[in-house]
Image (cartoon, rainbow, N blue to C red):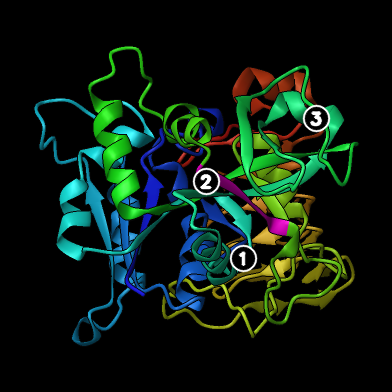
Amino acid sequence: MRVLAIVLAGGAGKRLMPLTADRAKPAVPFGGVYRLIDFVLSNLANAHFLRIVVLTQYKNHSLDRHISRTWRLSAMLGNYVTPVPAQQRLGPRWFAGSADAIFQNLNLIYDERPEHVLVFGADHIYRMDPRQMLDQHVATGADVTVAAIRQPLSLADQFGVIETDPTGRRITSFREKPTNATGLPDAPDQIFASMGNYIFRTQALIEALREDAVNPDSRHDIGGDIIPMFVKSGTAYVYDFATNVVPGATERDRGYWRDVGTLDAYYEANMDLVSVHPVFNLYNDEWPIYTGHDPLPPAKFVHNEGDRIGRALDSLVSPGVIVSGGMAVRSILSPRVVLHSQSLVEDSVLMDSVTVGRGAIVRRAIIDKNVVVPDGARIGLDLEYDRQRFTVTANGIVVIGKNEIIDR
């Protein structure tokens, strides 16, 4: 069966500022060594869907570089992961929405001539076997199948909500953040929340995109405009993510999915990785998360003198890290991070090449690349003072942008 995967990676990611000040949202680092986009690409690659185009738009240099360096597949076998920036094929304008992004790149579909098109988002943390979703899509004869995750009915106003017929399969309504949603036929206290992953019958997708393109009232959005077309015609079906079985998954991390659209959500998803029995398991060799690795030496812990002991507890420590008499607790240390003597990093995410000076304390913070925390500095201890210098989230997480200069 011929399949083309389209990954939508063109969002500006404004709610993740300052992490997206210099990069596209899918290029934001995660979990020490990964980028957000690595999760969807790994799911597709593990499922042997190896013809993938990534539609980019804003601040796409680091994203394009990561894809080009990391995601090299065998051209001999016709496999590829190709970043495709906005080409303005239809005139001097950017993508007006996710549907318009695909419409402006219909040539990619014409060239590949797939029977079905997978359209997946680029910025969620999860494992999923999309082959199982495709199998259901083909079996039902749907024009579109929408992946959905079960959520409490009380949270319906936070999601795009899918309502179904009594069978729980055919979609009868697709609404954004409704306040009067109804529960599922088999679970009245739950709703189906859209995951932003879709599978289309190719010709049906092309026809819907053409119709949408000439509609002056459309926002040209997949979820808001394209899916309702198929709901109206009765050819839209839901795929229940709870039925997806990923090889090697445990009961604890089965069904894990996080939308990291805000700084607090991004922080919490990172913290999900550092417990003794993490709710999201990076160590599943049967369904690995792929990424690129620089040729760095192993992490190093030095000094064992009094209170000058290099330690890391309940933490992820990447290659190239040097913990030189400092201490990390429940934290993620990305490549090339250095902790100097008597420093303390707690409940924090430090990105590439962050240096924490002697005696400095960092608590409940996200610190982007190349930041130097001076000797004796205090971050996360006085939020009122931190708000004068940095971004502080609603949950009290201090966020310091790439290359920012910190005063003591």
Residue 259, image quadrant: top right
Q: In which quarter of the image is the C terminus?
A: top right
Q: Residue 63: x, y in percent?
A: 35, 53
Q: Residue 347: x, y in percent?
A: 79, 50
**Most common secondary structure along the magenta stretch:** strand
Q: What residue type is labelled 1?
A: Met
Q: Mark 2 points at which residue?
A: 371
Q: In which quarter of the image is the N terminus?
A: bottom left
Q: Residue 268: x, y in percent?
A: 75, 46
Whether residue 94 is visible here, answered yes or no, is: yes
Q: Distance between the residues labelled 3 and 2?
A: 37 Å
Residue drawn at (30%, 79%) of the image: 73
Kindly state the secondary structure of the residue where label 2 is placed: loop
- The one of 232 and 364 positioned closer to us in this rendering: 232
Q: Are the residues flagged by discs 2 and 1 in contact, CB closer than 8 Å?
A: no
Q: Residue 322's mark? A: none
The residue positioned farthest toward the top in the image shown? 217
Q: Which of marks 3 and 2 is nearer the N terminus?
A: 3
Mark 3 or mark 2, whichever is nearer to me:
3
Q: Earlier in the sequence, mark 2 or mark 1?
A: 1
Residue drawn at (62%, 53%) of the image: 350
Q: Earlier in the sequence, mark 1 or mark 3?
A: 1
Asked whether residue 199 is drawn in magenta, I would say no
Q: Residue 155's mark? A: 3
Q: Give the range drawn in magenta.
A: 235-241
- The one of 336 and 69 positioned closer to us in this rendering: 69
Whether residue 374 is visible here, answered yes or no, is: no
Kindly state the secondary structure of the residue where label 1 is placed: loop
Residue drawn at (73%, 34%) of the image: 397
Kindly state the secondary structure of the residue where label 3 is placed: helix
